[in-house]
Image (tube, rainbow, N blue to C red):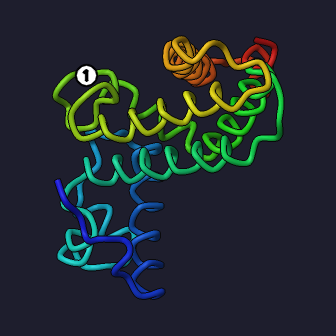
Amino acid sequence: MKDYPVTDLTPKAERTRELILKTALALFAKQGYDATTMREIAGEAGVSLGLAYRYFQSKESLVLALYQQMAAETDDAIAQLPAGTVAERFVSTMTARLEQAAPFRETFGALFGAIMTPKSGVELFGGEADAMRRQAEDAFIVLVRTATDAPNATHVQDVGKLLYGAHFAVLLFWLRDSSDGQRATKAL
């Protein structure tokens, strides 16, 4: 699935694209992923349906754009980490990830079923999202490789993948954490 290349957009077009994405994510959170149509997204964003489709070929493309944004933010957060142990860097990364994901908590809640359903078009483990999942996984490998206590080179990839899995488990726990201010997640 190819969408309008983000790099080819004028500033006005980029604002329009962001408006459509922001509107879609708000509607997903409000009424659910399955119940939201591209027509509703376009109408709520104040753009024509054709223009919405120019930027995003489908609802799935909108979710994939969110994944892409989150993967890029993970890369940036890890690249900016100060020197430290694997554990210190993982905690810092998770703190940043939870802050990045906070505005999308309700959206992720609404998407949860589709995210976990194979062949849904937005499943996190395969399909179109696979490249973004690998990008995030690679970022955790970098986190491990550049730590002050990095393991032997033969174990860096395994530890990085393990931390990616742990990161995903923390995000899922956070998504379902009903404690005040998600205190239970922060206590992990």
Residue at the image point whose x is 57% and y is 37% from the top: 105
Determine whether 37 is above or below 121 in the image.
below
> Mark 1 = which residue?
117
Quadrant of res 90: top right
Q: Nearer the viewer, residue 97 or 120?
A: 97
21 left or right of 123 in image:
right
Q: Please name the residue shown 63% across and 22% down the image.
A: 174
Q: Residue furthest front?
A: 153
Mark 1 element type: loop
Q: Position of residue 82 (x, y in %)?
A: 82, 40
**In the image: residue 181, left or right of residue 36:** right
Number of disc labels: 1
Front residue of this view, candidates 13 and 20: 13
> Residue 141: x percent and y percent?
55, 28
Is 52 located above or below residue 98 in the figure? Answer: below
Residue 104, image x, y percentages? 55, 43
Say which quadrant the C terminus sits in.
Answer: top right
Horizontal side of 1 relative to 41 (left or right) equals left
Residue type pointed to by label 1: Thr
Residue 51 found in image quarter: bottom left
